[in-house]
Amino acid sequence: MTNRAIIATNDAPAAIGPYSQAVKVGNTVWVSGQIPLDPVSMTLVEGGIEEQAHQAFKNLAAIAAAAGGSLNNAVKINISVVDLGDFATVNGIMSDYFDEPYPARACVQVAALPKSAAIEIEAILAL
């Protein structure tokens, strides 16, 4: 089996299911989808899409740091939202967390997300 390292940090929410926050193989890190949970209380942050998107990106950034990188090491981002009408807002917030050139990205609308979150974001990093 390929040598893999499990990435975990207390600065991001603990997994709420049978998965790791991230897995590193070689110089590639696969970061599990992050919903806007506060890592201390493990509760969904209060507020709308703005507050939720910021928290989800903060959670991703904490895991990227624990892996030895940053969000600027992202090569692919997948964003799921329950309302595609939030697309422009999420774009604006995403630009606060990444420098150009931006990573590849997909953004899709889904019927529902865990804990009734409005957004979930996952990433692939190349360190």
Image (cartoon, rainbow, N blue to C red):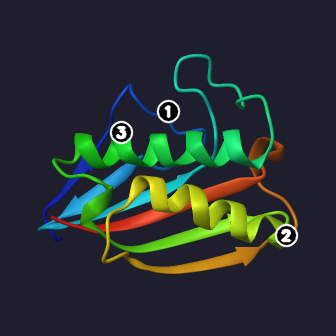
Q: Pick the residue in front: 102 or 13.
A: 102
Q: Is residue 86 above or below residue 10?
A: below
> What type is the residue that disc 1 sits on?
Ala
Judged from the image, the secondary structure of the residue bearing numbered disc 1 is loop
Q: Earlier in the sequence, mark 1 or mark 3?
A: 1
Q: Is residue 56 left or right of residue 100?
A: right
Task: Tell me the distance, in whole angstroms, between the alpha carbons under discs 2 and 3.
Answer: 27 Å
Q: Secondary structure at mark 3?
A: helix
> Farthest residue toward the top?
41
* Residue 56: percent from left, percent from top: 56, 46
The residue under label 2 is which amino acid type? Gly
Residue sitting at x 28%, y 62%: 72
Q: Which residue is mark 3?
A: 62
Element carrying mark 2: helix
- Where does label 1 land, which residue? 14
Q: Residue visible at 38% across and 25% down?
A: 10
The picture places residue 96, in percent across and down from the top left corner, at 46, 53
Location of residue 81 by image quarter = bottom right
Asked if residue 104 lies left or right of residue 54, the reply is left
* Residue at numbered disc 2: 85
